[in-house]
Image (cartoon, coloured by chain):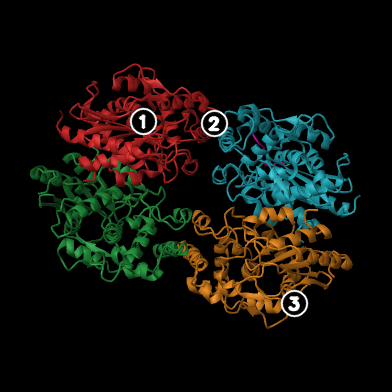
Chain colours: A cyan, B red, C green, D orange
Amino acid sequence: MAKKARRVDLDHLKQAVDEIVARMDVIEDFGKAADHLEGLGDIETDRFAITVATVDGDLVSGGDTDVPFAIQSISKVFALTLALRAYGDEVWKRVGREPSGDPFNSIVDLERHKGIPRNPFINPGALVVCDIVLGRPKDHGGHADVRAFLEHHVGEKTLGRLKEIVTEDGKSAGYLNRAMANLAKAFDNLHHDVEAVMKLYVEQCAIELTCRQLALAGRYLMHDGIDGNGEDPDVDAKLSRRLNALMMTCGQYDGSGEFAYRVGLPAKSGVGGGILAIAPDTASIAVWSPTLDENGNSLLGTLALEQLTTRMGWSVFG
Amino acid sequence: MAKKARRVDLDHLKQAVDEIVARMDVIEDFGKAADHLEGLGDIETDRFAITVATVDGDLVSGGDTDVPFAIQSISKVFALTLALRAYGDEVWKRVGREPSGDPFNSIVDLERHKGIPRNPFINPGALVVCDIVLGRPKDHGGHADVRAFLEHHVGEKTLGRLKEIVTEDGKSAGYLNRAMANLAKAFDNLHHDVEAVMKLYVEQCAIELTCRQLALAGRYLMHDGIDGNGEDPDVDAKLSRRLNALMMTCGQYDGSGEFAYRVGLPAKSGVGGGILAIAPDTASIAVWSPTLDENGNSLLGTLALEQLTTRMGWSVFG
Amino acid sequence: MAKKARRVDLDHLKQAVDEIVARMDVIEDFGKAADHLEGLGDIETDRFAITVATVDGDLVSGGDTDVPFAIQSISKVFALTLALRAYGDEVWKRVGREPSGDPFNSIVDLERHKGIPRNPFINPGALVVCDIVLGRPKDHGGHADVRAFLEHHVGEKTLGRLKEIVTEDGKSAGYLNRAMANLAKAFDNLHHDVEAVMKLYVEQCAIELTCRQLALAGRYLMHDGIDGNGEDPDVDAKLSRRLNALMMTCGQYDGSGEFAYRVGLPAKSGVGGGILAIAPDTASIAVWSPTLDENGNSLLGTLALEQLTTRMGWSVFG
Amino acid sequence: MAKKARRVDLDHLKQAVDEIVARMDVIEDFGKAADHLEGLGDIETDRFAITVATVDGDLVSGGDTDVPFAIQSISKVFALTLALRAYGDEVWKRVGREPSGDPFNSIVDLERHKGIPRNPFINPGALVVCDIVLGRPKDHGGHADVRAFLEHHVGEKTLGRLKEIVTEDGKSAGYLNRAMANLAKAFDNLHHDVEAVMKLYVEQCAIELTCRQLALAGRYLMHDGIDGNGEDPDVDAKLSRRLNALMMTCGQYDGSGEFAYRVGLPAKSGVGGGILAIAPDTASIAVWSPTLDENGNSLLGTLALEQLTTRMGWSVFG
């Protein structure tokens, strides 16, 4: 255990997780699934899972913790990690670090800021990040892509893939992303072919993880040299501190302010119902429940994180 | 000559055109060429041409009246004519009729109005009109496309084509149009493939006409049965009255208000430096001069039309 | 009768007006009154009036032609006339001439264009015009205000005034106008006190005219020296030509494009249900009917003008 | 010392502060003063002060720590505290909790969201909060206003006041705020007179504190019952946790994302050059230096906080 890590009371944590799972079992029918993502098929809206990976190496889980789900926008954190490891703060010449004040799929900001997306977690920002990842030199030494990165951090080679993603191509969300990619390209902020960038983007969104796998994957964001994978711990600490800052201000789309207010942890959500939240120096937390709120964040997942952070005193705001 | 046509004093008109051409010869260096249209190559910024086709069938010309230029956005009037002839006011379910208040290439309005372009003369509106033209039934009986329409109205089969337009495809303007087409498609207001619509759009923009040909092509917009091509004159009169209204309020991009204020005629400009202006029941006027003002309209062309309309008393506003 | 005036077939006109009035009598319940203008009280939604003042000096009327109504935004045309007579094109340094693409009461454009309203007929533009009128030198020789201007042009000293306008002060519309006046002042484009400008603005909006009076007031906009009031006819012709251009592109709020398409005359509407329309060189037309469409323009008034212009062939678009 | 408080290594802190002050002494000329705030007069751009109030009750200071400066927008945190103590989450019915993505003085968002400001730290949000504070019942039992609140928390009755603030009234910023207040009132989200709300707003912005006083005033935001002023510690902890969340996501105007990225503490800046930053459970930190960056935040103040948080390991992000 490293110098800044806060020891976690494991019994307290297990009790908290058990109670949260029990409470979620009796909550149903909390909204609507992400019906704009046609590839998701029928969804049982009452499923719930949680896994907490502590700084001490313990795993505490509850619910449908072995059901895989598409990580969707959570992949944007991992793609940004690849870009920052390769180029550092050079990345910020092509994408901003400010909350957008507009929905995640808004094209307005991109035009107003002349092709520079407001942050790497709205769709146009993620597309530019994918373009940066594609542009790394052949011998960059990093992971080939988000899938390779995740296989390394989870420690498994058999990560799943959303089957129906191929059909998403012909649907509304695909065209909207293509519109944003073309607009970025019109401003000379996309260097590869639109379709090549789209392919990388769709591929990483389609990766399926279980809650257990996602919590393992997020351990490096506790930034205390936890992952033991040989990266430079000092570089890594600084990197994850910055990633956490971005997740705090921009990670929950247009609901980031409310999420910070209620939960108080840096986190990134995906429309597949997953959320990865980080208690710095303490824990990597993954929750999953498919029903989304009006901002596109998991309804039960957010509620569970609010309860967990209150129970454990893990809010970064005291 | 039809019932509403106003007889034109031909000597007066010839004198006015001669004086305007003489004046334009001494005006040079009035701005910058449309350097965002890479296909246009080097431009001699002091070229000028004018042709007036009167309701009586006379043609009065001056300047470089046989130099072909790409009609670019002027083609939007002809494409809209094809759409309105096929579907009438049904067209307005998919595109609006209001000035946009934003530059011609703005994507903001398109998002704000959920995929319905503000009018058929901004780029997203023209793309939707192309999509409508593509969707006409096989046996619609109208002209196959804008080129066929123009061949018919000009009475020639040898209209030119901008050679370098193929290269425009890879440039900024092409990506911006693709962004708008994809955004319209995301809102389900584009029914054909983006590339098929883009192809039709680029093809019609690349048509080259001389001033003489353009003035001939615009005669049907005087709407007095002038073209003698067998269309129903009543339908045609109503149609051209409406096209003139649209050209008046939306025809000069974000400079339509100033154009109406100074010139007082319905008109449509193109970034190739051409303008087609209509004096209802009186004349079809084509001007060309490549240097553009800050709104993308021909600088000398606008000035010439202002002088012509003042000299001839042709402003529709009295 | 002046040189450009078009003789009007008076019998044809009388027949057209009679038929329009008869048709309006059977149309009812066409929408909702301007319920955001609390001062207007209960409105009988089926009232209708029309007066046409021809270039030959004839008056043809029908319906409730002696019922006074508040001219509201129609006053913006007269206020702009005062400003243009005093300062000419200098006015355009402080207000634009382009359609706004946003509702009449939008504050967005004013911020985007740094305190320069898009045109003189949206509310912020009218407030800046009032500020210009207030700033005329003591000895400017023009009319003191819109009321004096109208008394002169109507030839009566007993024009009415909307009684309840004092209460409007405390209502939503008043605060919105104050917001826009303060924003213009923040950009240094309002030189007098906000309340002084507001007072002039509210006073001119509250002037009550009958249809007959409004048609008389608008005669100077036919610009053929009709009003016989000693102004320089050449200056006046140029001025009214320009005012007509502005009314055509910007006169019906966010419905200007559709109005041009359907009616084809320059016109200005007010939320009191009045519309002043000009057939250049031909006629000054006033209609009134209190029920408004979704853009804030008189529903029956617009319909009547569409029928009149079709019957008489008065569309400026042929 | 309360249960969650983190003990601070005082020697380490003193050394860090000394080094930061020494470094700031050699940095000069870092930008431009807030020249849009005319009341501020001539500014010596190289002044710098810092005070850290630890959870243990220690005070560590350096630089011009006894020079008073206007707290300006930092007062928005204290006004919000008064509102939340009186009404709790009811406050969020009238103001949002999301970053705005637009500059602090933008009026666009206010119109788009129909009079509901995006958050309480942009100007329209602060005006609505002042309106809420004004509306508290006579016997609410809380502090009369921000001045009384600060006198209580600082423990002094002689807080200063910016002298020239009366002149700000007639300047650009005053009109802009009046525009926003009137717009909120047009949407019925301001219940008191605009001038009454403006007066409260201007008064609280004009309060002058030294760095020492500001650090003392911020202690309650460490939320560990530090202030010893008899408020309910549980309520207070929850309150300050939420205030910290808001400061993190919205506290530095349009530079909040970058501030979180670089500094990693919840904080609120003012155009007077002050910043109040909170290390939860650990320290209340005040810095002051008048030169501002392009987002309106203290240039040297931000730099100092970045160095302090790095040295002390106080970033909430690990």
Q: Quadrant of residue B287?
A: top left
Label disc, if present, on residue B80 of the rendered structure: 1
- Residue lying at the far front in this picture: please name it: B26
Tell me the amino acid under the disc marked 1.
Answer: Leu
- Counting from the top left corner in percent of width and height, residue B312 is at 20, 40
Is the Cβ of the residue at disc 3 closer than 8 Å to that at disc 2? no
Tell me the SS state at disc 3.
loop
- Counting from the top left corner in percent of width and height, residue A29 is at 64, 45
Measured Cα–Cα span from mark 3 to mark 1: 74 Å
Instruction: Judge whether D214 appears above or below B318 on screen.
Output: below
Between label 3 and label 2, give the one nearer the viewer: 2
User: What residue is disc 3 on?
Assistant: D229
Q: Quadrant of residue A191?
A: top right
Measured Cα–Cα span from mark 3 to mark 2: 66 Å
Tell me the SS state at disc 2.
loop
Image quarter in which the N terminus of chain B is found: top left
Chain letter of disc 3? D
Q: Within the magenta stretch, is there residue A44? A: yes
